[in-house]
Image (cartoon, rainbow, N blue to C red):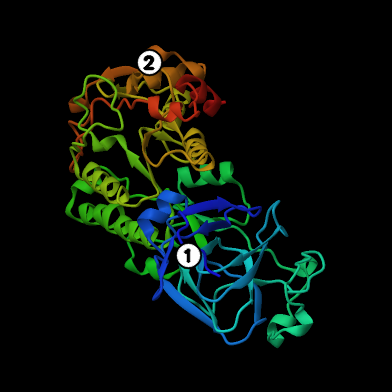
Amino acid sequence: MTEFGKALTVAETAIPGLLIADLPVHGDSRGWFKENWQREKMIAAGLPDFGPVQNNISFNDAIGTTRGIHAEPWDKWVSVATGRIFGAWVDLREGPSFGTVFTSELDPSRAIFVPRGVGNSYQTLEPDTAYVYLVNDHWSAEAEYSFLNLADETAGIDWPIPLSDVEISPKDLAHPSLAAVTPIPPKKTLIVGANGQLGRALRDVLGEAPEYEYVGRDELDLSDPSFTSTRRWRDYATIINAAAYTAVDVAETPEGRAEAWAANVTGITALASIANENGITLVHVSSDYVFDGTKPDEYTEEDGVRPLGVYGQTKAAGDAIVATVPRHYVIRTSWVIGEGKNFVRTMASLAGRGIAPAVVDDQVGRLTFTTDLAGAIRHLLDNEAPFGVYNVTNDGEAQSWAEIARLVFGLTGHDPSRVSGVSTEAYFASASGPIAPRPRNSQLSLAKITSTGYSPRPMRDALADYLS
């Protein structure tokens, strides 16, 4: 018999993420009413904001109708409309809880949230029983399921009505034992721009486990609108966008401006839409170029953006778009150094060839080594840090490009005094073609990222390691 007047409560079970809820049911002589899914109240009570897109009803004529055990690649919210059922849930996901069992009766006043990969099965305890389930992905013949035999001895489910006495489909009777079950793998992390210097560092930091998928521009080009249809996006938990148009001077030309906006804004808009529609965490790497460099001290995450050139404008626009994704990290960084051609390697080469360069001395900031940047991204994800904007560079005193060049000369055994300073205007005076304006101050405050427990290496130490 349905219990009326319960308070809305949510409780954990022995299976991680499997949540059982008591629902308020209001009844009188005419019948009863309940809110089967009320997003605002139920999220406040502890249920996830799982974004249902399809609502199904299963009606069962007879007592003892038994269905399952099926593990689907989506989350579901199961609630009884009429009658009463016995439910059994078995964790069929990869990991230490694989094989864990939970059972409970459900009636209109009790419902359950079943996370992706947890096998679920139901046995009706009353005639004319109907249960409703909301799922957060549309049914697809291409979706991968996992199954468990209802009579599996390892699971040892104590069915109220013996399986020999109930109606079961031949297909359900043929499901494998637990020892033969293929576990449901975790959702994947997609690294976009995997062939760039940050992408290569992310591969080193994250590794080659199956849940990490690395794609270069030849496999996924953000400036190509067709990329949105290249994947089943519900299979991803996280997207790390390490791709961007970064040719800051070329961006000042008509052709470069179009390419910069296509990759850094239009492509990011599509990526953010995918994340919004599929509940994906989106990690996006931004730049000090969103600021004009006129602030006398470090820029914080709360400072308003004032980009000077086209590249900075596209990055600022991309940041604003990514901020519309509920689960997002915008990583602002500066002066990135990784594998491939970069300022540090150029200075080391000049030092070794006996060249005495003139280097800009009126732009101040910190280098960011891709190993530290990738480590910060992993730290935020692994520790489930609050979503939002984070500055990430290496630590230590900010320096000009000329001062960093002198450090490179000294660390490679050459005379730092060979490096002379020059103003930005003088350095670019003889350049042909447009030159993008640079922020003179690129110092980013690290207080927020360090408050989460991540401490970037001092810039000088990281530079010495890089050169060694």
**Which x, y percent locates residue 20?**
56, 58
Three-letter code, disc 1: Arg
Single out the residue that lies furthest toward the right.
153
Tell me which label, 1 or 2, sits earlier in the chain: 1
In this rendering, position of residue 433 left or right of residue 455: left
**What is the secondary structure assignment of the residue under circle 2?**
helix
Alpha carbons under labels 1 and 2: distance apart: 56 Å
Quickly name the residue at label 2: 418
Residue 149 lies left or right of residue 312; in this view the side is right
Residue under pointer 1: 234
Q: What amino acid type is highlighted by mark number 2?
A: Arg
Question: Can residue 351 be seen by looking at this rendering?
Answer: yes
Residue in view at x 46 percent, y 43 percent: 198
Q: Is residue 10 above or below residue 149?
A: above
Label 1 SS: helix
Q: Position of residue 139 (x, y in %)?
A: 49, 77
Q: Quadrant of residue 115?
A: bottom right
For label 1, the crowd category at 10 Å Cα-Cα, with few meaning under 14, some 14 to 19 and many 20 or more, is many
> Percent x, y for residue 324?
30, 51
